[in-house]
């Protein structure tokens, strides 16, 4: 249970227990790795991957708004990219502009699934600038890793098109620029 609890800020421990209890039990498994991120002055550990069946929509409706947000965040770590995309869209429909929610979205944006990154760009550009600023300032090493990862994917999949990094149409760069702009830093 501890790995589930550390996936969110400590103040949500009871909500984590409720969310965990509603997941389909037989297949509920987290991958061994986690992504450690400092958010709102505490560390959370985002699961690398989640291996679980999807939850019934009726069960989701029984959860509080916060618990639904947590569930959607967890499913953005699902092993199936289509499931990640569906829950990302649910998360973006009605979510709090909290740093811990942003952490799940930014981590997802750093993975190479262009369709998902395209969905994330407008959400990040409209995100509360103060939350983005604090997010970048809380963990500069994490932000550097995210930027490096996005550059690596651009290099592997888009550079062959002849684009230069500053001119690239890769949506990951728009996310980085939006974070930089609101944090008033040249490099994240």
Image (spheres, helix red, strand yellow):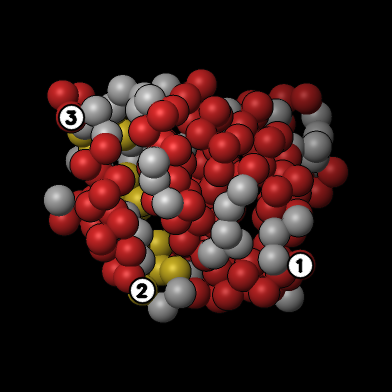
> Label for residue 42?
2
Q: Is residue 45 left or right of residue 133?
A: left
> Label for residue 77?
none
Give me the residue at 44% from left, 38% from top: 61
Q: Secondary structure at mark 1?
A: helix
Give me the residue at 65% from left, 27% from top: 115
> Residue 161 occupies which quadrant of the picture?
top right
Is the C-beta separation of discs 2 and 1 under 8 Å?
no
Which of the two discs, 1 and 3, labels the residue nearer the N terminus? Answer: 3
Name the residue that disc number 1 marks: 181
> How far across and down, in percent of the image, does residue 20 sit?
24, 44
Q: Secondary structure at mark 2?
A: strand
Q: Is residue 122 above or below residue 180?
A: above
Q: Is residue 93 left or right of residue 181?
A: left
Q: Is residue 98 above or below residue 90?
A: below
Q: Secondary structure at mark 3?
A: helix
Crowd class of label 1 (few under 14; some 14 to 19; many from 20; radius 10 Å): some
Tag in front: 1 or 3: 3
Tag in front: 2 or 1: 2
Q: How many marks?
A: 3
> Label for residue 25?
3
Q: Toward the viewer: 1 or 24?
A: 24
Tag in front: 2 or 3: 3
């Amino acid at each position: 249970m501890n790995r589930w609890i550390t996936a969110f800020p400590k103040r949500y421990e009871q909500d984590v227990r409720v969310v965990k209890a509603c997941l389909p039990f037989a297949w509920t498994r987290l991958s061994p790795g986690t992504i450690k991120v400092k958010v709102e002055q505490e560390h959370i550990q985002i699961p690398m991957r989640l291996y679980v069946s999807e939850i019934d929509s009726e069960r989701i409706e029984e959860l509080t708004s916060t618990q639904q947000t947590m569930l959607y965040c967890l499913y953005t770590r699902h092993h199936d990219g289509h499931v990640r995309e569906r829950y990302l869209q649910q998360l973006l429909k009605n979510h709090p502009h909290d740093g811990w929610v942003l952490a799940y979205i930014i981590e997802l944006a750093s993975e190479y699934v262009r369709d998902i990154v395209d969905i994330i760009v407008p959400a990040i550009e409209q995100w509360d600038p103060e939350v983005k600023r604090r997010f970048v300032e809380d963990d500069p090493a994490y932000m550097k890793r995210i930027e490096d990862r996005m550059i690596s994917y651009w290099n592997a999949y888009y550079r062959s098109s002849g684009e230069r990094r500053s001119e690239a149409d890769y949506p990951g760069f728009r996310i980085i620029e939006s974070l930089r702009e609101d944090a008033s830093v040249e490099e994240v």
